[in-house]
Amino acid sequence: MDVADFVIGNLTEQIVTYQQVAASMRDDLMALPDEERAEAEEAASVLRHVGSGSTRPLLPLSVVRKAAP
């Protein structure tokens, strides 16, 4: 590429920093109690849906897990 080294270095540092933040957030999420983690994941799902611009309303659904036979 015909780009100054400082540009590549800066972008590389930004990528590394984002990866570190994402890893930290994943660790924090996994440290939550199961109920709180499920609530956070549901909230993230709603935000993704809203952010996608979908005009369909969300239905209040719950996950029902079957017991192992």
Image (cartoon, rainbow, N blue to C red):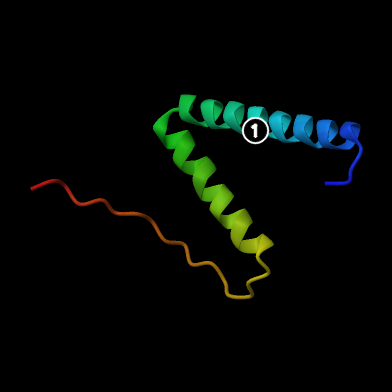
Count of labels in the image: 1
Residue at the spot 40% in from the left edge and 33% down from the top edge: 34
Camera-side residue of 33 and 53: 53
Look at the picture and state if 62 lies above or below 68: below
**9 or 55, nearer to the observer:** 9
Q: Is residue 2 above or below residue 35?
A: below
3 to the left or right of 44: right
Circle 1 packing at 10 Å, graded few (<14), some (14-19), many (20+), is few
Residue beneath the point at 65% across and 33% down: 19
Q: Is residue 46 left or right of residue 9?
A: left
38 to the left or right of 45? left
Q: Position of residue 26 (x, y in %)?
A: 54, 32
Q: Circle 1 is placed at which residue position? A: 19
**Residue in the picture at 53% in, 41% down:** 40
Q: Residue furthest front?
A: 2
Mark 1, secondary structure of its residue: helix
Residue in view at x 82 percent, y 31 percent: 9
Return the x and y of residue 10 as percentages of the image width and height.
Answer: 84, 32
Residue 55 at x, y = what percent?
Answer: 64, 75
Q: Is residue 16 above or below residue 38?
A: above
- Residue 64 vertical placement versus 56 (above, below): above
Q: Residue furthest bottom?
A: 55
Q: Nearer the viewer, residue 47 or 8?
A: 8
Which residue is at the far left?
69
What amino acid type should be assigned to the residue bearing mark 1?
Answer: Gln
